[in-house]
Image (cartoon, rainbow, N blue to C red):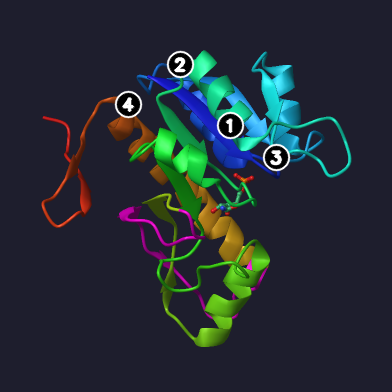
Amino acid sequence: KKLAVFVSGGGSNFKSIHEASLKGLLHGDVLVLVTNKHDCGGAEYARNNGIPVVLFPKVKDGSDGLSPSELVDTLRSFQVDFILLAGFLKLIPVELIQAYEKSILNIHPSLLPAFGGKGYYGLKVHKAVIASGARYSGPTIHFVDEHYDTGRILAQRAVPVLANDTAEELASRVLKEEHRLYVEVVEALCEERIVWREDGVPLIRSKD
Ligand code: GRF
């Protein structure tokens, strides 16, 4: 399968997916990287690895950056099957959601629906988890709809919150699990092992 990854930051999830693909662990290849920040770590990694980088959305009062319909055309020109958001901080336009129905995933560093939505990104998520006294946190991978963090949940994994954890410590424990979980889920996606239950809940079929 052909994959597009969207990043705004360091791109460690993008790197782990790309590395898994290079090792032949996924039946998928990352064909294009989409970013709203040309100089972010993820974009740099893409350029160093010969993956084309596309800027989205249009930068205010600049000529750079694609419009939503240009983005859809670009992804189609790469024959992209699935879109993986990995720390992409912009809202996904409805044109893209309609063009790639049930084909866009996001990873979020908390057990959604807790600690999700517009204000919850980066360390803010982990600070709020610690302040709440929750004993477990962990990544959620979900399909993307037109709002932040509300699409159908596909996979989650619990990670303990330890006594005296700082937000940074919790973030790095969760991030390690993110890398494992995203690779597993993308593997299932590429192998067409996602099934939709009648009530609209997506499930992952295990390997036979
Ligand atoms: C991850 O914590 C992810 O859950 C969130 O943004 C972060 C991206 O990290 N959506 P990285 O850029 O993959 O290192």
SS class, disc 3:
loop
SS class, disc 1:
helix
Q: Residue at x 45, y 81 (%)?
A: 134
Indicate the amino acid at tag 1: Ser
| Contact between labelled residues 3 and 4, with CB atoms less than 8 Å apart | no
Q: Residues within 10 Å of mark 4 (few under 14, many from 20)?
A: some
Measure the C-alpha gap from mark 1 to mark 4.
25 Å
Indicate the amino acid at tag 3: Pro
Residue range in magenta is 146-167
Indicate the amino acid at tag 4: Cys
- Label 4 CB less than 8 angstroms from ligand 1: no
Residue 26 magenta: no
In the rendered image, residue 7, in percent from the top left (x then y), is placed at: 63, 40
Measure the C-alpha gap from mark 2 to mark 1.
15 Å
Q: Mark 2 sits on what residue?
A: 79
The disc label shown at residue 57, or none = 3
Q: Mark 4 sits on what residue?
A: 190
Indicate the amino acid at tag 2: Gln
Q: Residue at x 77, y 40 (%)?
A: 37
Q: Residue at x 72, y 30 (%)?
A: 43
Q: Main secondary structure of the magenta part?
A: loop
The reply, left or right, for residue 199 in relation to residue 148 is left
| Contact between labelled residues 4 and 1, with CB atoms less than 8 Å apart | no
Q: Mark 1 sits on what residue?
A: 69
